[in-house]
Amino acid sequence: MATVADQTSEAVPDVRLAESRGVHTPWTLASYSSLSAWKTRAAQIRRHILVVAGLYPLPEKRPLNARIFGRVERLGYSVEKVFFESLPGFLVCGNLYRPSLDGPHPGIACPHGHCRRGRLENDDATFGSIPGRCINLARQGHVVFSYDMAGYNDSSQIEHREFGGRREDLWGIGVLGLQLWNSIRVVDFLQALPGVDPNRIGCTGASGGGTQTFLLAAVDDRVGAAAPVNMISAHMQGGCNCENQGHLRLDINNVEIAAAMAPRPLFLVSASGDWTCNTPELEYPAIREIYSLYDAADRVATAQVDAGHNYNRESREFVYRWFGRWLLGRDEPFTESAFTVEPHEGLLVFHRRKPPAGALDADGVTDFLIGRSESRLGDALPDTPASLRRFRARFAPALRHAVAAGYPKAALARDMGRTRSDSYIVQRLLIGRPDFGDRVPARLFLPRSGPETSPGTLLVHPGGDDALSDTESGRPGPAVGDLLRRGHRVLTISPFLVGASPSNTGLRDTGVPHFHTYNPSDASCRIQDILTAMAFLRSREDVTVCHLAGVGEAGLWCLFARALATGACRTIVDGNRFRASDDAHWAQHLFIPAIRAAGDLRTAAALIAPGPLYVHNAGSGFPIDAFRSIYRAAKACPELRICSRRVNRTTLHDWLTRPSPLP
């Protein structure tokens, strides 16, 4: 055998191992050349937020069953206690401040941040006065609802900083999603109130309340004006669980999330003494550039106060003027009048009282949300071609955003040397996507005789490409050898952190806080590497069609890759006896945030059908019946083979190497 080495065959590191991104990783802010390009990006951002928060498609809105009581009349306003159910058994609690004059008035949602007393905070020396803000807005002519973060004050059904975990992440369940849904229901509550103009809704909050403000404004067009205070930064994205959810900020940041509100009026308040110190020179111009695409640069503005992290009087007065202009239609220098805050017992909803019967605890909330996702999916599972089209329209975007991988337009391959024998050539490669810095070690096996073009098969093993070759001689292993004898070109790869290649010997620093908010899971990276390898193989002029086969644990990586790919032909999936209804099994073997809320294996099957698919070694926990039902709906039953037992290689390769029509 003869070997030819590349002159630059040194190991090239995979950028995904170089640095783990986190809350404090600085972002380079993108620029958009056209309104069309930005609108496409904004739609992706909105959908991505909802997917990772377990809210896509948007769930059914159940009755709020709101209770408003304990009204106290004060000079120019009144204040009441409120609770309602954002979910059956999960309560949103707060205070409703109304002007004394008859409406209709604008409605303003006031989420609070991570201050010690939550919505009761009243100390300008530290954070600011939340009741004072609400009183003044009400006197100025707004109906204001100040509501708890989950886990604060009256909203004690979960622990704010402890709720969630790896199992919940699989379903897109976390404090962020709960609070975003709460805020959406707060808008429902405000719009339904007598005396509120449903077309004039605003939102403002500081710190973590600022995060809630721009997340809500990004996904809910009913928010007509917003003022997130001291939060939007290109170098700090928010450090609490309620600001982070798995896969949320893989390629989006708070600046773009806030800009997704354009062209609705947006006001950025920043402070010289916290992470918003650069807002006037960095974040604000980037957002204003996007507003300019709409010819709406006058609808975004900024002001900075010389103070630490706050929502102090100066900040509040900036916001009063903004809402006065855009919600009241009055361009006046609104100033803050003196106020007296009610004692805590006058504001707390459940002061010395228990929440109503039926209120869920943390486990009950999780069980309800999982049940809601499963019900939504079960009701939508297709049984006709028309229902299959509807299912794909609803769940395909969710799967794509959850997996956070995609079929690339191009794939690059670096030649790392080759070996020749009498019957084949083995070419060592590093495959990656342009501008991404990923490196996928691969071997391409080419027969030295036969036609100039032939089918190509990507073969993926959980042990990497070394597991498919004889490590001592470098000769192809039995599976590769059999496909070569059948005339196929064969590509084997070592997906991310798989195999013994130098590019895969490191381990990521997963100890970074909120690691999976900013970095794709290992399984997502492996699915992406398979997609990149498929794009490379299919781009070769000597390959007529591209087949895909996954062995052992790599079988389900290939299933998801095939669901997200274009142009693949026959696909073999080793089901590896996967326990598809066992969350612990998912968390251990195929962890991808929000994958279960996105329909998991069932959505993948719906995206593959009617493509030829052979699933074997499925075991008893695999959704075999769902796969068959989906293929029946696609009128493609002959194209699916699925069985619980393991099938021998000869049978699989006989099926794989059947002549197939070009895709």
Image (tube, rainbow, N blue to C red):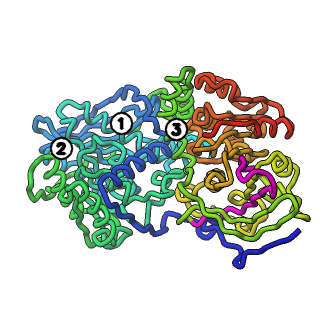
| Label 3 Cα neighbours within 10 Å, binned few <14 / some 14-19 / many ≥20 | many
Element class at badge 2: loop
The circle on residue 185 is 1
In three-dimensional space, the C-alpha distance between marks 2 and 3, rounded to whole angstroms, equals: 41 Å
User: Would residue 346 be visible to someone looking at this image?
Assistant: no
Query: Is 568 in front, or is 326?
Result: 568
- Residue tagged by mark 2? 142
Q: Is residue 40 magenta?
A: no
| Rendering coords of residue 282 (x, y %) | 33, 70
Compare residues 334 and 254 and report the one nearer the observer.
Answer: 254
Q: Residue at x 55, y 24 (%)?
A: 382
Q: Amino acid at mark 1?
A: Arg
* Amino acid tagged 3: Ala
Disc 2 marks a residue whose amino acid type is His
Please provide the residue range marked out in magenta. 437-460
Residue placed under numbered mark 3 in the picture: 396
Q: Nearer the viewer, residue 23 or 652?
A: 652
Q: In which image quadrant can residue 299 be found? A: bottom left
Q: Check residue 616 in the rendering and tell me which mark sits there, or answer none.
A: none
- In the picture as drawn, the residue positioned furthest to the bottom comes out as 7
Quarter of the image where the C terminus is located? top right
CA separation in Å, label 1 and label 3: 26 Å
Q: Quadrant of the N terminus?
A: bottom right
Pointer 1 or 3: first along the chain: 1
Q: Residue furthest top?
A: 384
